[in-house]
Amino acid sequence: MTERKVRVRFAPSPTGPLHIGGVRTALYNYLFAKQQGGNLVLRIEDTDSQRFVPGAEAYIIEALIWLGIKFDEGVSFGGEYGPYRQSERKTIYKEYVDRLLAEDKAYIAFDTPEELEMKRKEIANFQYDASTRMQMRNSLTLSADEVNTLIEAGNQYVVRVKIEPDEKVTVNDLIRGEVVINSSVLDDKVLYKSADRLPTYHLANIVDDHLMEITHVIRGEEWLPSAPLHVLLYRYFGWEDTMPQFAHLSLLLKPEGNGKLSKRDGDRLGFPVFPLEWKDPKTGDLSSGYRESGYLPEAVVNFLALLGWNPGNDQEMMAMEELIKLFDLGKCSKSGAKFDYEKGKWFNHQYIQLKDNKEVAALFMPVLAEKGVTADAGYVEKVAGLMKDRINFIYELWDQVAFFFVAPAGYDEKTVKKRWKADSAAQLAELAEVLSGCEPFDVEGTETKVKAWIEEKGYHLGNIMNATRLALVGAPKGPHIFNIIEALGKEETIRRIRQAISILK
C-alpha cells in the first residue's frame, strides 16, 4: 500500500470562544503535521444549530492566527476538499445516511423526548440499543407503510446507527495503546436529525475525515468514548483501510484540586482560559484573553506545548521551529496536566527577556500613548533595556519606568524621613554643580566624577546616592542611579535635583 501524505484536522464547533484546551489540541495537530511534512486542515463543525454562537468562528480563526498556528487549507484558507464548514455539506451527509439505511446498518426512530423520558423512568440505566430498540417506535418495529406515513405527515425523526451486540471493537491509540471494548456497551447513537436536516458529530466527522483523506485524528480525551463507534462506522462503510490513526490527548486539569480546567477556575484565580478576550453576544459578559492580558503568543505556545508533553529532557524554552522538530505523540502523557498558570507568567517573562530592546520598546509604545506620553523611540528603547528584566508583562513597565518620562510630583514620605538628611539639600546643590561640568554625560563619566567628588569631600556615599534617587525618582526604586542620570540627561537631572531641594528644603 502506498504511504499516504499526513493530513490532520482541527475541527472546533462555533459554540463560543475557543478554550485553552482546544488551543493546545490545535497546536499539537500543527506540530505533528509540520514535523511529518503534512497538511493541517481547519474544519468548522457547526452541525449543532441550537448551540451556534455568532462571531465564534471568526474568533477561533483570529486566535489561531495570533498564535502562529498556520493552516494549509480549510475555512477561510481554501483548498480542494471543501466546503469545510459542515453546515454547507448537508447533501453529502444525506447520501451516507441513506446508504446506512439501505444496508440495514441504521434505522429511523420517531420516539419523542417525552417517550424517551418515560422509558428512562421505566428501565434503570436505560440505553437505546439492541436490548431495547424493539420496544421503541422506529422502523424496526413499524411497517414500511407506517414509517412513510409518519414522514409524509411531517413527524420529526432521527436516524440511529444499528449496533450489533457482542462484537469486539479495537481502537489503536497512539497515546493510550490498544483499547478493546465489547459493542454491547455502546448505544445506538443518533446520526442524523430531520428537524434541521443535519448529521450529528458522529456521522459528520467520520464522513468528512474519510472524504478529506485525514490520516491522523488528534483530539481531546473527552472524545475517547466515541472512538469505538467511529471505528464501527468505518467498518460499516467498508473504509477500514483508510481509517485514520487516533490519538486522544489528556485533559487540562484545575491548578488546584481535581477536575477539568474551567472558566470558573480562571475567574477565581485570576488568569485567562481563552486565547483572546471574548464578549458574549447574548449577555455582554466580558471574559479575559491571553492576548489582551499581555501574553506574547510565543510564550503561550511554549507554555501550552509542555502541558501534557515533554521532549524527554529538561529543556523548557522552545520556539515553534524547535517544538516542531522535537514533537512526538508517543511522549504525550496519558494522565491529565495541571494548569500551572504561574508557569505561564514565567514563560512570558523569559520571552520578554529574549526580545531585543527595540522590540520591547515597540510593544511598550501603545502603553505610553495611553498615558499621554510622547517620547523618542531611541529613548524608550534605552529605558526598556534598563527595566525589562523586572517584568512579566509589557504593561507592567509603566509602573517601573514612569519616572523616566514624568518627573515626580511628590516624594515618598517614608523615604523622605529615612533618606533626606539635614545636609542633603546642601550636598545635592553641590552635586548639581558637579554634574553640570560632566563631559561626557554618560554612566562612566558621571560615576567617575561624582564618586571622586564624594571622596574628596568626605561625604557618605550611600546618603548622597539615596537622596539623589529620591530627587530623580520620587521613591526608592529604579535601576543603577548613574543609568538613570545618563537616561534623563544633564538638563533634566539637574532640574529634578533643584526641584527636590526647593520642595524638601
Image (tube, helix red, strand yellow):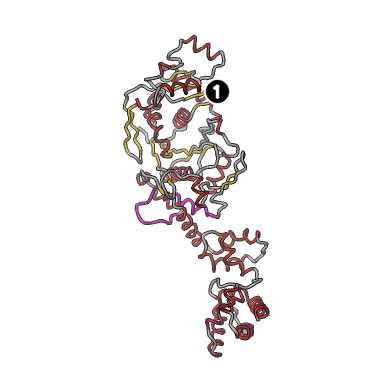
Q: Vertical placement of 44 versus 235: above or below?
A: below
Q: Vertical placement of 99 versus 260: above or below?
A: above
Instruction: Give the number of marks.
Output: 1
Spot occupied by residue 431 in the image (x, y as percentages of width and height):
61, 84
Please tell me which residue is depicted at 45% across the width and 15% down the height of the picture.
Answer: 139
Spot occupied by residue 205 in the image (x, y as percentages of width and height):
46, 31
Please tell me which residue is depicted at 43% across the width and 40% down the height of the picture.
Answer: 220
Residue 19 or 35: which is nearer the viewer? 19
Does 189 appear in magenta?
no
Please tell me which residue is depicted at 49% across the width and 54% down the height of the picture.
Answer: 299
User: In the structure shown, which secondary structural element does the residue marked by tag 1 occupy?
Assistant: loop
Does 312 appear in magenta?
yes
User: Label 1, on which residue?
Assistant: 195
Quarter of the image with the N terminus in it:
top left
Q: Please give left or right for residue 210 compared with residue 438 in the image.
A: left
Quadrant of the rendered image containing residue 99:
top left
Chain part drawn in magenta: 294-318
Quarter of the image with the C terminus in it:
bottom right
Q: Please give left or right for residue 213 compared with residue 407 in the image.
A: left
> Can I make out residue 411 in this image?
yes
